[in-house]
Image (spheres, rainbow, N blue to C red):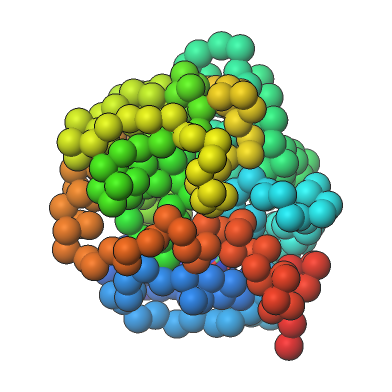
Amino acid sequence: MSKKKYPKILVGGSEGYIGTKLCELLKKKGYNFETFDINLFSKCLLYPTKSKYKKIFKDVRDIEDDYLKNFDVYIHLPGISNNPVDNFKNKKKIYDITRKYTKSIAKKCKKYHIKFIFASSCSVYGEAKKKNLNENSKCNPITHYSQNKLDIENDLRKLSDKTFAPIILRISTLFGFSPRMRFDLALSMFLVMAIKNKKIELNSDGQSWRPHLYLNDLVKVFEKSIFLKNKKLEIINVGSDINNFKIIDVANMICKLTKSELNFLNKKNKNNLIKDKTVNYGKDKRNYSVSFKKIKKIFPKIKFTSVKKGLEQDIKFIKKINLPKNVLNDKKYFRLFYLSHLIKTKKIDKNLRINK
Ligand SMILES: NC(=O)c1ccc[n+]([C@@H]2O[C@H](COP(=O)([O-])OP(=O)(O)OC[C@H]3O[C@@H](n4cnc5c(N)ncnc54)[C@H](O)[C@@H]3O)[C@@H](O)[C@H]2O)c1
């Protein structure tokens, strides 16, 4: 069996929103892979996962060299996957933990010639002055989350050389269903608001641009990246030019598809889970539309799902599963609220370590 054709893959952070879908695909396609995760969100399943594969309960900080060196490719998904909510005292510090462990495992991958694939985010463009930003455009992160992604990208750049060429995927804002679902992502939140309440409540004036990406398409990009023969560090915007939209336009699209109405969030609404603290006086400064020329060239065979088609598929899917009544009031589906609950109840400590 040729090592190139059948690489041995390790997926870290495999039990989250992206990881569960990615591993379903790897399993279905018969890849040789193993996974590890600390299972922060083990109680947050929306519906059962279909596939069975080897799962190791382990913190990325405890992955031993002897284990890691068996792999050809490492896909790194552990991290804090959103912007902080109020109850995190030292917001920057909590992100620095993820930066430190990412750098540490990247160094080990370099040592053992393991390909490193990192889940970054288009949010590094932040408050953009221009449109159609490409991989060489200036980044202007305005949240701790996106600054953390950019810091990690820079760490990887410093580590990269002829022997170590990481792939950095700058992922658009995701939507689409996963067994370990997140409703803290704009489109999925809007969709459930529309279906459950027959109205969408926008946090902002909706004038900001954002690129969107269907989760099923992202996992194909990870699959293709495994085989990319890049000789130097490669940064790739992941998404499609057809899916750059103003928030208000996708909200209106959902209203049309679900026969719902569009409203602006009433300050009196008591549901903190749906309030976006990054939005001030109705303005969301995160405003970026992105160019996806590069990915189209690198992976021409991937056909990206349009936002409309993805939403239509999700509407069908919601009819098939039994969506709990108050999903939008349940912190299980809102990562940072759940994380802060885990800290408060002492399930994890301040270093994001599981309390034994
Ligand atoms: N979902 C998006 O729209 C999006 C977009 C761009 C980038 N990303 C990035 O992709 C990555 C995965 O995103 P997601 O939506 O699946 O997040 P998620 O929070 O659903 O999953 C992260 C997983 O990592 C695990 N984990 C956390 N700390 C760990 C540690 N120390 N050791 C081992 N496992 C650990 C968690 O238990 C969880 O299962 C994140 O870094 C996120 O920032 C996500």
The location of residue 186, given as percent across then percent down, is: 44, 41
- Residue 278 horizontal side relative to residue 157, left or right: left
Quadrant of the snapshot with the C terminus: bottom right
In the image, farthest residue toward the top: 130
Q: Nearer the viewer, residue 98 or 207?
A: 207
What residue is at 56 percent from the left and 11 percent from the top?
A: 130
- Measured from the top left, where is residue 196 in percent x and y? 28, 51
Q: Is residue 240 left or right of residue 230?
A: left
84 in relation to 345, above or below: above
Q: Which of the 4 quarters of the picture holds residue 25?
A: bottom left
Examine the rendered structure and indicate whether residue 207 appears above or below residue 47.
above
Residue found 42% across the figure and 55% down from its top: 328
Please name whichever residue, 114 or 211, is drawn nearer the observer in this view of the structure. Answer: 211
| Image quarter hosting the N terminus | bottom left
Q: Residue furthest front?
A: 268
How many numbered circles are shown? 0
Foreground: 5 or 300? 300
| In-front residue for pair 277/230 | 277
How far across and how far down the image is residue 322, in percent? 24, 68
